Amino acid sequence: MTSRLARLPLLGAALLAGSVVADTGVGLAQQNLSLELANRLVDATLEACHADDRTAVVAAVDRGGNLVALQRDDNIGPHNTVAAQRKAFTSLSTGTSSRALAKIARDDPESANLNTLDELLLLGGGVPVTVDGDVIGALGVAGAGGSAIDEGCALSAIEDVLPQSSADQ
């Protein structure tokens, strides 16, 4: 019992040291895509597609690649849901549009193996969402009628919802 009591000052010192480390500012503060913003972006993306008489599925992921919001129009093929999620993840992971990454993989022999990574989908329609130069998430669009159209719907939504971020892209 005495040896246990003798350890208490050591435990107190360890706890105090931990609190000192926590107060030194060692940590990471990051912006992230909230559910509210994700829903606004997804809604705006579908509105952009609908304005062009197109239907689609839209996925929004946060900076960790977690699915935050997803909406699918009627009569969209089920494979498009997975495609939208993977396009968003691809864009988030690389910080670039999935369409630009597909072009890089086609044109640069050193990047051709990007096609072998199961997590990435090198089709247009994935676009990073940036705020103050930081990628906070991404949108993925599929089923609207091609890579350029999918990407255009997402870019239009980002411009409408976050006009200042379009310069970051």
Image (cartoon, rainbow, N blue to C red):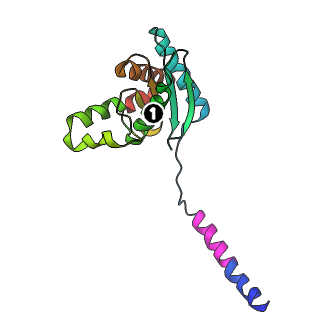
Against 31, residue 125 (above or below) is above
* Residue 18 on the magenta span: yes
Give the side of residue 82 with respect to residue 37, left or right.
left
Q: Is residue 125 visible?
A: yes
Task: Please report the residue visible at 34 percent of the width from the left and 33 percent of the height from the top.
Answer: 122
Against 18, residue 49 (above or below) is above
Q: Quadrant of residue 70?
A: top right
**Amino acid found under the numbered disc labelled 1:** Ala
Q: In this view of the protein, which residue sits in the foreground, 134 or 52?
A: 52
Q: Quadrant of residue 154?
A: top left
Per the image, label 1 sits on a secondary structure element best described as: helix
Range shown magenta: 12-22
Q: Residue furthest bottom?
A: 2
Q: In this view of the protein, which residue sits in the foreground, 119 or 53?
A: 119
The residue that disc 1 covers is 88
Q: Position of residue 101 (x, y in %)?
A: 31, 35
Against 27, residue 123 (above or below) is above
Bin the neighbour count of mark 1 within 10 Å (Cα to Cα): few under 14, some 14-19, many 20 and up. Answer: many
Q: Could you tell me what secondary structure mostly forms the magenta stretch? A: helix
Q: Quadrant of residue 141?
A: top left
Q: Looking at the rendering, in which quadrant would you find the C terminus? A: top left
Task: Please report the residue visible at 61 percent of the width from the left and 30 percent of the height from the top.
Answer: 36
Q: In this view of the protein, which residue sits in the foreground, 9 or 67?
A: 67
Q: Is residue 129 visible?
A: no
* Residue 84 on the magenta span: no
Against 40, residue 63 (above or below) is below
Q: Position of residue 147 (x, y in %)?
A: 36, 22
Q: In this view of the protein, which residue sits in the foreground, 24 or 114?
A: 114
Give the side of residue 156 with respect to residue 13, left or right.
left
Task: Please report the residue visible at 48 percent of the width from the left and 19 percent of the height from the top.
Answer: 56
Q: Residue furthest front?
A: 78
